[in-house]
Amino acid sequence: MYLNKDTGSIGISELIVFIAVILVAGIAASVIISISSTLETRSLSTGFQTTSEVSTALKITDIEAHNTSGSIDKLLIAVTPRAGSTTIDFSSTFLELSNTSIKCIFNYTSGYWVDMTAGVDNLFNIDAFPASASRYGLIVLRDEDGSCTQDNPLITAGDMIGITINTQVCFNGIGPNTRINGLIVPEIGAGAVVAFQTPTTYAEEIFRLQPIQT
């Protein structure tokens, strides 16, 4: 009689321990599944970001200057996405320029955006050059898909825009034989290096600057 009672007690204890082990194992499995799911999501996100960083880049196609009384007072830097680039947002892209004594950081301002896809009589006479030492404007040169708007200046493959800078207000003009260095830095991807040396004399009102190969 006592033996049967003792055996019953031991069986219930083992059942309780068994249930507890199952509960602990279930909780552990739930934690492991949750962690693996989080790691998978993060790895996918990191992969997409890395792909965007590697594939996205800007290319400078042309740099033109406007000369007034022997000093460059306006600059236009034409840029386009490199092959394979994702969409580049210029509302979050900044430009830095230095003449070795002054360094300026420019950000986009929507007040100086001009659609020039239909052409224009005189590029440097249009209201696209901000009167600010910290702002740049945009001229849309080519945009087949209509992605580059005033409030959302996005460029995709094949698009081309001109970054406009008023160098009179940031550098008090750029004189002859001056080295300019800078960088166009998008939010995602590789930037474009801006580097050129102005000629020893300015014989024309509008002329092209030969970028220095870096």
Image (cartoon, helix red, strand yellow):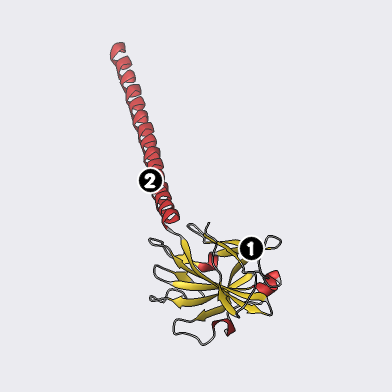
Q: In the rendered view, does 147 fall on the left or right side of 106?
A: left
Q: CA distance from mark 2 to mark 1?
A: 49 Å
Q: Residue 7 in the image: x percent, y percent?
A: 30, 16
In the figure, 209 relative to 54: above or below? below
Determine whether 36 is above or below 142 in the image.
above
Q: Front-most of 169 and 134? A: 169
Around disc 2, counting alpha carbons within 10 Å, would you say few (fewer than 14), some (14 to 19), or many (20 or more)?
few
The answer to whether 193 is drawn above or below residue 32 in the figure is below
Taking the image as shown, residue 191 lies to the left or right of residue 130, namely left
Residue 104: percent from the left, percent from the top?
66, 64
The picture places residue 61, in percent across and down from the top left corner, at 47, 68
> Mark 2 against mark 1, which lies toward the viewer?
1
Q: Is residue 21 found left or right of 78 in the rendered image?
A: left
Disc 1: which residue: 179
Q: Nearer the viewer, residue 68 or 96?
A: 68
User: Which numbered tag is attached to residue 152?
Assistant: none
- Quarter in which the N terminus is drawn: top left
Circle 1 — which element? strand
The three-letter amino acid code for the residue at tag 1 is Arg
Q: Position of residue 129 (x, y in %)?
A: 60, 78
Instruction: Identify the residue under disc 2.
Output: 40
Which residue corresponds to the image point at 54% horizontal and 78% vertical from the top-left? 113
- Does the rendering let one see residue 207? yes
- At x 48%, y 58%, the residue is 188
Q: Quadrant of residue 9?
A: top left
Amino acid type of disc 2?
A: Glu
Which of the 4 image quarters holds residue 65? bottom right
**Farthest bottom residue in view:** 121
* Residue 196 relative to residue 79: left or right: right
Disc 2, SS: helix
